[in-house]
Amino acid sequence: MAKKYCDCGNPASWLYMPGFSDGNSFVCDDCISQVDSVGCSCNWEYTIGECATIPEGIEGKDWKWVVQTANEHMSEITIDDGIWVRLDERCRPYPCAEYEYDTDGNNFDWDDEES
């Protein structure tokens, strides 16, 4: 059995499930999401439209507005667009829904034949 590690060298606690990433599919809890990130669009909520939801809790602690300057991958998003994201206990957006968390603490310690 071989333990799985993040690129930073820490034990992995998250696994990118589609398995077709260009690099290491294993990520530690410190590297999975950053406070200044807008997170993955699969976790975004909208205050405008048919399925509108209003954020609850404290802004900056429980949720934050998605604000993004335009780049080669994404168009500009402003507060006026009404998009927000929930934050984890470390004030980071939750990772993409395509990541699985190591809930039993075994660090994805699989037999090499199974991985």
Image (cartoon, rainbow, N blue to C red):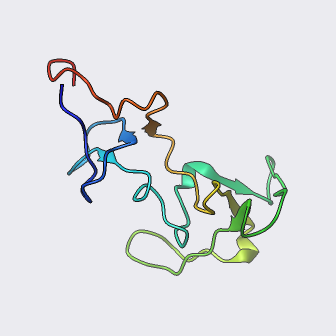
Image coords of residue 94 (percent x, y)? 57, 52
**Residue drawn 42% across the image and 78% down it:** 71
Image coords of residue 23 (percent x, y)? 20, 51
Q: Is residue 106 above or below residue 93?
A: above
The reply, left or right, for residue 56 in relation to residue 39 is right
Q: 2 and 51: which one is in front?
A: 2
Residue located farthest toward the left when viewing the structure as drawn: 113
Q: 2 and 94: which one is in front?
A: 2
**Residue drawn 21% across the image and 18% down it:** 114
Q: 113 and 75: which one is in front?
A: 113
Q: Is residue 7 above or below residue 26?
A: below
Residue located farthest toward the bottom when viewing the structure as drawn: 69
The reply, left or right, for residue 13 in relation to residue 7 is right
Q: 35 and 40: which one is in front?
A: 35
The reply, left or right, for residue 42 in relation to residue 9 is right
- Quarter of the picture containing the C terminus is top left
Q: Is residue 38 above or below residue 115?
A: below
- Quarter of the figure with residue 26: top left
Image coords of residue 47 (percent x, y)? 80, 59
Image coords of residue 109 (percent x, y)? 28, 28
- Quarter of the picture containing the N terminus is top left
**Residue drawn 25% across the image and 39% down it:** 4
The reply, left or right, for residue 73 in relation to residue 46 is left
